[in-house]
Amino acid sequence: MSAGAASMNYELAGDLKIGQVGIANLRIRTLDVERLGTEMRERVARAPKLFERAAVIVDFGGLPGTPDAATARALLDALRAAGVIPVALAYGSSDNERLAVELGLPLLAKFRAQYESQEPAAQAAPSAPARTEHARTESTRPEPARTAATTAGEPGMMVSAPIRSGQQIYAEQRDLTVLATVGAGAEVISDGSIHIYGALRGRALAGARENDKARIFCREFHAELVAIAGHYKVMEDIPADLRGKAVQVWLDNGQIHIAALA
């Protein structure tokens, strides 16, 4: 049985989520180094422009215990061989902190809030999480919003100019409306929903603070990647008959759904 066929028959050993600045969080569910390496190789092969040499935070918080340094190093080597770059460990227990020191990696709390409602309080991040280097989206945001509504009294953000390759627009605690095109290599991010009245050729990340009720609406769909509350799909995963169409994107039971608008 090929690696691709095998991956269809078992639950993924690691959950990959896309964060607010394009850094991926790999939540380890099953500490099987070979499987994790195979899964990551398949992700990179399917979307090399997005995942090749992508920065990845490794999160051991889904395991019953912290792995030993030798196993962790083997995992990091497998991820590098698969084509991504492990840049940090996610905050966890004191054992996890010691492991990070031994591995020579920093600790980041960027994604911890996504799991706090699902796991024991002992797994929660410290009260003063580390900041990312990105100036426009910091890891020190408040608790995630759980509804699609924007902050009371705060209007949505509207952008009328085209968003070009390399640009990033972020609408904090509100919806984002783009009246023009989101070009290839550009990124639009919102804590609420995203409405695009032109073509979407880059990336759109809605519900960036784990708002699983957020949606993406687009008049012409050619997206490199769409994500809601960290769950994502890349262009290679999207049915060909939806490309170029007006669509909406939403999340249901942890699965991304895309449908044409009537």
Image (cartoon, rainbow, N blue to C red):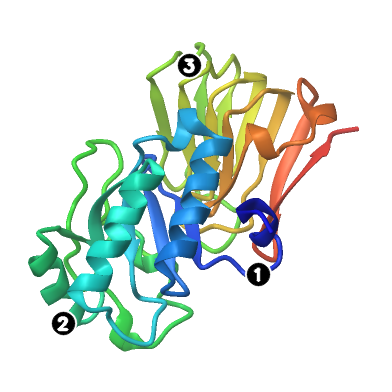
Q: Earlier in the sequence, mark 1 or mark 2?
A: 1
Q: Quadrant of residue 241?
A: top right
Q: Is residue 81 above or below residue 36?
A: above
Check disc 2 and report the residue beneath it.
94
Residue at position x 31%, y 86% in the image: 65
Q: CA distance from mark 2 to mark 3?
A: 43 Å
Tell me if I can see residue 231 in this picture: yes
Residue 183 rendering spot, x and y as whole percentages: 53, 16
Residue at position x 41%, y 74% in the image: 31
Q: Secondary structure at mark 1?
A: loop
Who is closer to the viewer here, 113 or 195? 113
Cβ atoms under marks 1 and 3 closer than 8 Å: no
Check disc 3 and report the residue beneath it.
163
Amino acid residing under circle 3 = Ile
Amino acid residing under circle 1 = Tyr
In the rendered view, does 108 fall on the left or right side of 56? left
Q: Which mark is residue 10?
A: 1
In the rendered view, does 27 fall on the left or right side of 2? left
For the C terminus, the quadrant is top right
Residue at position x 59%, y 15% in the image: 181
Amino acid residing under circle 2 = Ser
Q: Earlier in the sequence, mark 1 or mark 3?
A: 1
